[in-house]
Image (cartoon, helix red, strand yellow):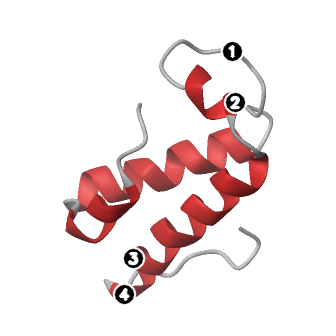
Amino acid sequence: MRLWHEALIPCLPRPQLLGQHRECCALRGLGWGRPHRTVNYVFRYPYEYLYAYHRLVMEAMRARGYQVDSLW
């Protein structure tokens, strides 16, 4: 899966928003630095950028009433 532009996050339909969350979780977990051709571009940027992006995704989820695990 690819990551959508941050400006589109509030507009994403439910499946795409939850998909972004799953992708961020995978990348932030053991997937960080593991090559995969659809997300290799992410590794050219600091890890903190992914963290900030994931925060935006989680904020959009909370705004829609989803409960996000506080561990993320």
The percent position of residue 48, horizontal first and vertical second, equals 75, 56
Q: Quadrant of residue 14?
A: bottom left
Q: In this view, does 46 lie above or below 43?
A: below
Q: How crowded is mark 2: few (under 14 residues within 10 Å), some or many (20 or more)?
A: some
Q: What whole-number distance in Å separates the C-alpha atoms at marks 3 and 4?
A: 5 Å
Q: What element carries label 2?
A: helix
The residue labelled by disc 1 is: 35
Q: Is mark 3 on a helix, strand or loop?
A: helix
**Which amino acid, by three-letter code, is at mark 2?**
Phe
Give the quadrant of the C terminus. Answer: bottom right
Whether the residues at callouts 3 and 4 have beta carbons within 8 Å, the answer is yes
Q: Residue 60 carries which label?
A: 3
- Viewer-proximal residue, 20 or 43? 43
**Which amino acid, by three-letter code, is at mark 1?**
Pro
Upstream in sequence: badge 3 or badge 2: 2
Whether the residues at callouts 2 and 1 have beta carbons within 8 Å, the answer is yes
Upstream in sequence: badge 1 or badge 4: 1
Q: Is mark 4 on a helix, strand or loop?
A: helix
The percent position of residue 26, horizontal first and vertical second, equals 64, 41
Q: In which quarter of the image is residue 60?
A: bottom left
The residue labelled by disc 2 is: 43
**Which amino acid, by three-letter code, is at mark 3?**
Ala
What residue sits 28% from the left and 71% below the top?
10
Q: Residue 27 carries which label?
A: none
Say left or right for 25 vs 1.
right
Q: What whole-number distance in Å separates the C-alpha atoms at marks 1 and 3?
A: 28 Å
- Viewer-proximal residue, 6 or 66? 6
- How many marks can you see? 4
Say left or right for 59 vs 72.
left
The residue labelled by disc 4 is: 63
The percent position of residue 63, horizontal first and vertical second, equals 36, 87
